[in-house]
Amino acid sequence: MEKNKQQKLKRSLKNRHVQLISLGGAIGTGLFLGSGKTIQLAGPSILFAYIITGVICFFIMRALGELLLSNLKHGSFLDFIKDYFDDKHAFFFGWTYWFCWICVAMTDLTATGVYIRHWVPNMPHFIPPLITLILLICLNLTAVQIFGELEFWFALIKVIAILSLIFFGLFMLVTRFKVHGNIANISNLWQNGGFFPKGIKGFLFSFQLITFSFAGIEVVGLISGETKDPKKVIPKAINNIPFRIILFYVFALFIIMTVYPWNNINSAQSPFVEVFSDFGIVMAASIINFVVLTAAASSCNSAIYSTSRMTYSLAEDGIAPKCHTKLNKKQVPRFSIFFSSAIICVVVLLNYFIPSHIFEIISSISTICFLYIWTMLVWAHMRYRKRIADKVKLEFKMPFYPISNYLVYFFMAFVLVIMFFVPETRVALFFTPLWFISLAIVYWWKFSD
């Protein structure tokens, strides 16, 4: 399968873009809105669950980083799947990754309707998703720098919100601020049933929600082909991941659970709203609503970018229509953006005809598909290592290879088992195989000899 040599994506993303994109990929609405639910599920032990999941994500990203730096001529991680497997695996991997982001975009676009209605209760639910999608399409068609700038500012808003929470929470803790009859104190972490108040079951069940909150962290591997000085920028972005997870997830949740006893946190409301409100910030709910709105828009923006670049890469490898390789004057894959956006736009219709709980199934299916993507990336890294043996001196190594690779495999299998025991996610385990069966039929029909 020959590649289109005439048009190539432009390396326009700067260091600050990549750093904030990688940061934004690790911070989503799961922290701002879903943290109350996860805290109620596991109590203070959620801190350990985030640390464990964060370590696994770091191993995944180090494996990906080592692959990306092994061949800077490759435009994305799809090229490495083809290198270390074959066209069939690349077909399954590429279209599954595309499907992951389509699902993410659908759920996040639907969420924008909910967030906007906080301010305009009578607005029809389908209008905010439609306006958001049209706006993001127009911006993505201009230049890759626009995508980078959008993600830079979206991520910056999230960072400021989290740092503000930490600042106000620390002030409450130091001054022993009284909140709802309780004094902010570090002892709130263990005074209400210990670190594992819901037992081992609650602790284990929290991993499914936490894993989904990290979906998208691998997007750095997709933007590598449009990154300036990738040898310097990509390792820096990946090596900063542990610090970011500790600061923005673990420390933020630590602050929340010291300000409030964990069992007093409202699972239906963002803990961020509670902290800001109790500190006397009247507009707390509107501020956090704005933050989660930008987080949803950021995720949808990443989805449009990721799906369009993936179909572009698939078309270059001959496993998607060649029209997806066409770039506009700004060196952006115009047709790919329109194609993916048209599929995403189906969510507007779904808001009319399908009950909202269907999106729980879609997000769960997306989680399973992301587990497949991460497993394949780590597997490709193992094949790369076996192929080079000791022939190449590596400057950016996967720590503890190959033990770390096997730890990732074990964790992926563990999350799948947990999903089977959770009623809300069990259904997705039966629906997801239909996607892979559909891909097998299409591949057999179009590409089998």
Image (spheres, rainbow, N blue to C red):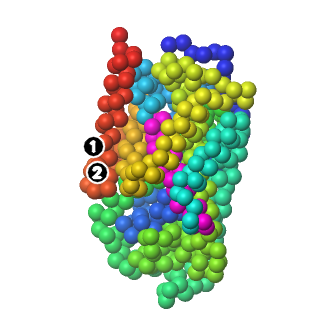
* Extreme residue in the top direction: 449
What whole-number distance in Å separates the C-alpha atoms at marks 2 and 1?
A: 7 Å
* Extreme residue in the right direction: 329
Q: Which residue is mark 1?
A: 430
Q: Is residue 231 visible?
A: no
Q: Position of residue 426 (x, y in %)?
A: 28, 51
Q: Which mark is residue 444?
A: none
- Of residue 55 and residue 249, the one placed in the foreground of this image is 249
Q: Position of residue 330 (x, y in %)?
A: 73, 30
Residue drawn at (35%, 14%), measured in percent from left and top? 448
- Of residue 226 and residue 111, the one placed in the foreground of this image is 111
Label 2 CA crowd tier, 10 Å (few <14, some 14–19, many 20+): some
249 versus 259 height, above or below? above
Q: Quadrant of residue 443?
A: top left
Q: How many labels, in total?
A: 2
What amino acid is found at the position of numbered circle 2 in the picture? Arg
Q: Which mark is residue 426?
A: 2
Residue drawn at (69%, 26%), measured in percent from left and top? 328
Q: Give yes or no for contact between labels 2 and 1 (Cβ–Cβ under 8 Å).
A: yes
- Of residue 352 and residue 257, the one placed in the foreground of this image is 352
Q: Quadrant of residue 134?
A: top right
Residue drawn at (50%, 13%), measured in percent from left and top? 1
Judging from the image, what secondary structure is the residue with disc 1 in? Answer: helix
Instruction: Say left or right for 154 vs 198.
Output: right
The residue range painted magenta reads: 97-120
Instruction: Say left or right for 399 vs 13.
Output: left
Q: Quadrant of the C terminus?
A: top left
